[in-house]
Image (tube, rainbow, N blue to C red):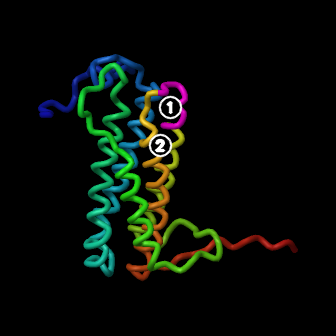
Amino acid sequence: MRITKVYTRTGDQGQTKLVGGKEVPKDHPRVDAYGTVDELNTIIGLVRTFIGQEVDRKTLTEHLDPMLHRIQNDLFNIGSDLATPPESRWENMVCVGAQSVKRLESWIDQLNEHLQPLPEFVLPGGGPVGAFLHQARTVCRRAERIVVSLARKEPKVHSTSVQYLNRLSDWCFVASRWANQTAKQPEHLWEKPTIS
């Protein structure tokens, strides 16, 4: 693919084209789905940018950045899949599969080994990397909800996209805790209200 011109003016009337040329309104469920996945990918990009500003950037870069790089590519593949209606699919089209989901599970287990069990819910925050990973987690959950809704209307949406997003939100949570611990950033817990 080669992009030579950024603006086309073809979307000025609120329409856009899916892969294959089918024209749909910009608030079409498919556009909402791949747009939210793109938003998530952008936040992952912010996480990668802020890794270099943390105290222990060497450990974060060596351990977290390769995962984030792979995740960004996976999200691009999910976005492409969501932007392609069934009739426009092609042979050997790259989609995330069960291997990608298992990779996330393996990463979650690796990172979680170094963390203490939580006695209570954790409040989003910490350092920039941890905080952006919490934001990624919530946008990932939104993307998951939108893709689930799309799959109900269009059953040919790949179920592994939903599985991947579900596992990715878990990964973001564990990675945020690991990043905060590695960068020596505080982790604040929810204070359960007491009845007075």
Q: Which residue is at the front of the view, 127 or 111? A: 111
Looking at numbered disc 1 in the image, what kind of residue is underneath it?
Ala
Q: How packed is label 1: few (under 14 Cα within 10 Å), some, or many (20 or more)?
A: some
Q: Secondary structure at mark 2?
A: helix
Horizontal and vertical percent for residue 89? 30, 25
- Compared to residue 182, the image places residue 161 above or below, namely above
Looking at numbered disc 2 in the image, what kind of residue is underneath it?
Val
Horizontal and vertical percent for residue 152? 55, 29
Span colored in magenta: 147-155
Give left or right: position of 158 versus 59. Answer: right
Horizontal and vertical percent for residue 53? 29, 73
Quadrant for the N terminus in the image:
top left
- Residue occupying image coordinates x 22% and y 24%: 8
* Quarter where residue 184 is shown: bottom left
Residue picked out by circle 1: 151
What separation in Å lies between label 1 and label 2 (alpha carbons)? 9 Å
Horizontal and vertical percent for residue 108? 43, 66
Q: Which mark is residue 162?
A: 2
- Residue occupying image coordinates x 45% and y 77%: 113
* Quarter where residue 57 is shown: bottom left
